[in-house]
Amino acid sequence: MAAKKRKKLRREIIEKPSGDSPVAQQTADGWILGIVKHRAFAAALLFLVSFSVFIPSLRNGLVWDDVTYVRTWAPQLESTPLNYKLFVPSRSEEAKTGKYFRPVYFTSLVMDNRVWGVSPFGFHMTNILLHSVTTVLLYFLILMLFKEFGRGHGESEAFLSSMLFALYPLHVESVSFIAARGDILAGMFFLLCLIFYMLSYRRLYYIILAGVSFYLSFLSKEVAFSFPVIILGFDLISRRMFRRANIVKYLIIGSLILFYFHLRSGSFMSSIGFLQEHSFRDTGALPGPGEFITIFLNTYLFYAWKLLFPYGLNHFIGSIAGGDALHAIIAVLLIAAVTAAFIISVKRKENITAFSLLWIFTTLGPAVLIAIYPLAITRFAERFVYIPSAGFCLLAGYLIVRAGRLTGKRWAGLAAGGLLCASYLVVTVKGQEAWTDNVTFWETAVRRSPGQITPRINYGEALRSTGRVDEAIRQHLMAVGPGIEATDRGKAMAANSLAADYIQKGDFLNAEKYLKAALEYNPKTEGQYNYNMGLIYLKKNDPAEAGNYLRKAVEIAPGYAKAHYLLGMAYFMEADMHKSADKYRLAVSSLNSAIGYDGNDMNAHILLAQVYLALGDRENARREAEYALRKAFDPATARNAESILKSIEANR
């Protein structure tokens, strides 16, 4: 009994804040300035480290969806006005029916475009800065948690946890991938929300700022659905849930959730039908509830392992191991252990441990749902753990420092924390090399997921875009060959890509062969088949036959902008051959349709300017050429626009 009392006394001395005696209070007051300076220095150091470790990303180009968001969307970003409507959206068609609605993320792209144009450097800079700010916010949040939970000052725990977060390897995808900025924004605003929410226990008006931050996290990414559980968990763990003032707080948070549901109601209704039609596709597990449980358990197990061992980076995870009874049993045991640890921690007032476990388990929920339902292009991704990793780093930092104190060997805790940070640093810096450009990105994805079809298709596409057609053909041949995990839809995509390789090479016989193969794999690719056949006949200088195929393509897929563009080109070539004004006018109609469906296609504007010039309509030709010159992001397009403008001036 005496030993237990001594152990309890030592724990209280180590972990609990100082008493409130006048002498102690006077000493504390005398150290306030020093503590503020210390914390400011720690925050500045964390910002510097989190920024510096991602400096290699500033040299990277645009990868995967980044090309769409930065270059393809450039005209839209330039024309979007920066006003309050971006943050207080109405129930627009996009909000009501779009699968994604992230105006805060879109606003960040608009602001980057205003400053940097289409320069990848600026967009990467913003991602790094946002991550650095999030790291500092986590530091101050942890300091507040220690105070609110009565666990002492917590400077060492907060600093180590935040340093782990700054260097955490799985953040490479979130920070180096511009398209993944939504996770950083949602995490940053939620940390602000929690900070203001805790402050609202001192001054109730802080709940307004907490609500605004919560709302902005919703408009950054849909993962904010899990955040109210964290807020309720904080109140539960800190024994504050049933305070009267909380009624006001819960009403505000609840009203914001209801408003968001109202804003997105049409989208949710359409998503229900989408999920009923496509859920559980290609999982290879048991149907119905059994499949749901299997994927649920397997996905939690997968992400738990990734959090514990974040070293084997893979930026395209097509599938994960597991799905059998052994993995299910391990997952059940893991969840049971975490649940038991949470309950025990709450009872023993180990509030930091309890809150960390709740944070991890709850914020992994959206990632698990994406694995079960086809809500995103990729079912698994390292960027999905950006927010859960904050809880993991909090738990890891706390346990390392606490172990050092309880054993009386603080140097051992310091050494363990330092070694862990060093290992994270090496992997994080090295991991950014894969994001240099599309070729490097997909080459790395193929090497790490050799049995997946999507990385091979995209790797081949990247190779073809750089003129390495023979290498692209090799990749696409492997994609349609044996040993690749793929559906018929995936094989059809690979065959179409292979046909595009052969078209670029001028081997039309093989191109037609693989276009027919794609049609056999998936009859729904008929529009793509007719488009590519039209392209083949255009290259054969047979615009009349090309037009027959392309008219079928736009009939099957009226919104297929590229097909309208090629049809306009076919009409233009026919008009040039036969000097037909009617064909020129048909070309104008098709090209206007192409621009209507995709206003960012500068080639369509260039060709339309040429058609207008052939018709003698210099005013419209000048308008299209000037627009293309103003919006062009590549030198070839700019040169073509300038050539047309010079031709107009020469014929005045």
Image (cartoon, rainbow, N blue to C red):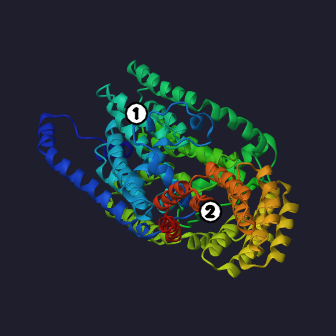
Residue 78 lies left or right of residue 39; in this view the side is right
Percent position of residue 5, x then y: 35, 42
Q: Secondary structure at mark 2?
A: helix
Mark in front: 1 vs 2:
2
Q: Is residue 484 visible?
A: no
Amino acid type indicated by mark 1: Val
Percent position of residue 421, x then y: 40, 64
Q: Which residue is mark 2?
A: 614
Of the image marks 1 and 2, the number of the one nearer the N terminus: 1
From this view, report whether residue 201 is shown above or below residue 444.
above
Percent position of residue 612, x then y: 60, 58
**Residue at x-position 46% and y-position 47%:** 79
From this view, report whether residue 549 is shown above or below residue 232.
below
Are circles 1 and 2 on residues that touch, CB within 8 Å?
no
Q: Mark 2 packing: few (<14 Cα in 10 Å), some, or many (20+)?
A: some
From this view, report whether residue 408 is shown above or below residue 140.
below
Amino acid type indicated by mark 2: Ala
Quadrant housing residue 424: bottom left
Nearest the viewer among 393 and 25 is 393
Nearest the viewer among 399 and 216 is 216
**Residue at x-position 33% and y-position 28%:** 201
Q: Which residue is mark 1?
A: 212
Q: Mark 1 packing: few (<14 Cα in 10 Å), some, or many (20+)?
A: some
Query: Farthest right residue?
Result: 520
Q: Quadrant of the N terminus?
A: top left
Nearest the viewer among 352 and 138 is 138
**Residue at x-position 33% and y-position 62%:** 49
